[in-house]
Amino acid sequence: MLAPGISPALQLLANRSGDPESLIPRIAAGEPMSSMLNTEATINSYPMNAATLIGKPSTLAMGLEVLRISAISQKEQLYQMHYIVKWKWRDCRVMMRCHHIDINDQNKYFREFWRPRLRISEREADDSDMLVQRHTLLGHGWDFFSEEHVSHFRCSFDYTDMPYDTQHCKLTFLIPDVLDSVIGLQWAVVDGEKMTNAEWAIEHVKDWRKYHKTVEFTSPFGPANSSQLVAEFTLQRRPAFLVNTFVVQAFLFYLLSWVGLWIDLQSVPARAAIAVIPVLVTSNMMNSLASMIPPISYDTRLSRILLTTLLMISAHMLEFGIAHYAMRRYKALAEKVEKWEQMSLDEATNEVPQGGPTRLVKIEFLVVKRIHLSFELMMRILSPVAYAIAVGVILG
């Protein structure tokens, strides 16, 4: 006797029974309907259920379990993720009297069962050796399908706020070239372990933002819509490493260069060394930072701090050159001016002294005297003030 509301064809499918080994090939071949219709049948096609029988799309619920995120490469803008995608949908062709049947990808009939051909737009590569797939068929017509992957994904990094940057990554799931009038996707549970990374704080999977969107694409029959699922999460940098490696060292080398301003100008080897060494080291730090990230057309906070440091310590080196030249020139001109003044005051001669300083020489003497007496003092005071303001603006 047929159950109320169930057609004779469905009743035949629901009455199938036996051990899993004998049921799997029968379900895969659509028995007993295929033999009754004397035609070859398969269930390796879109699901059939109450919705599809009246012309509505079949609904697939997709869940995501994230096991691990690792190998985050800021230079390649890639990360590796170990995850399990869990699907569930209704398909009356898998109805039977058994409680459930498991069919893994090692079963010879596995490919006879339909499964979503998932594409993740941001996926760059997939480790096929780690792929594990399994169907779990429930007697009342549910197909639970899971696929475990280890894949590499692309995430467009924005380094503007480096080393205090937060990267926003996205995963877009779709079944390519399938109309939303045929299959509609919806989110199920997104879950996973709390993950840690030495350089990045990974947002807890339960807090990932997930939503559905419809995207238009061009099919062979014209414009059509595709159902897609999107998950978004953040990677927040732990700045301690970059701050200690670059920022702290940049501050120390600036301080070392500034202390050099207090060394006597006549100690040329010491002043030259303390002026040149910080410039070379800071330049190497900038090259090291550039090698850590891909070529970009904009500055980062960290690169601006290093560039500001390089400019300031280069200004210290330039100041030493100017101040040292002014000191030597001042001494030379001072001797000439003093000699001329003595000759002018010599009461023993009535002749106007020859070879006295010209107007241009007098102006030069006043300029180098001013530089010699005050330029280095001004640099000692203004340099740390300007550097502190510039760094404060960058970090603010």
Image (cartoon, rainbow, N blue to C red):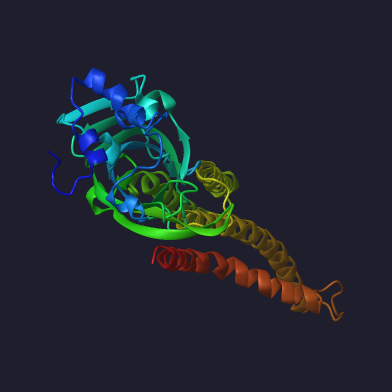
Residue 205 placement, left or right of 351: left
Residue 9 placement, left or right of 229: left
Residue 225: x percent and y percent?
Answer: 47, 58
Compare residues 31 and 260 and report the one nearer the observer: 31
Residue 45: x percent and y percent?
Answer: 41, 38
Q: Is residue 176 above or below residue 31?
A: below
Q: Is residue 213 above or below residue 109?
A: below
Residue occupying image coordinates x 49% and y 64%: 383
Compare residues 52 and 305 and report the one nearer the observer: 52
Q: Is residue 229 above or below residue 10?
A: below
Compare residues 243 and 54 and report the one nearer the observer: 54
Residue occupying image coordinates x 30% and y 53%: 51
Compare residues 243 and 51 and report the one nearer the observer: 51
Within the image, what quadrant is residue 67 found in?
Answer: top left
Residue occupying image coordinates x 69% and y 67%: 334
Residue 333: x percent and y percent?
Answer: 72, 66
The quadrant in which the C terminus is found is bottom left
Residue 344 placement, left or right of 267: right
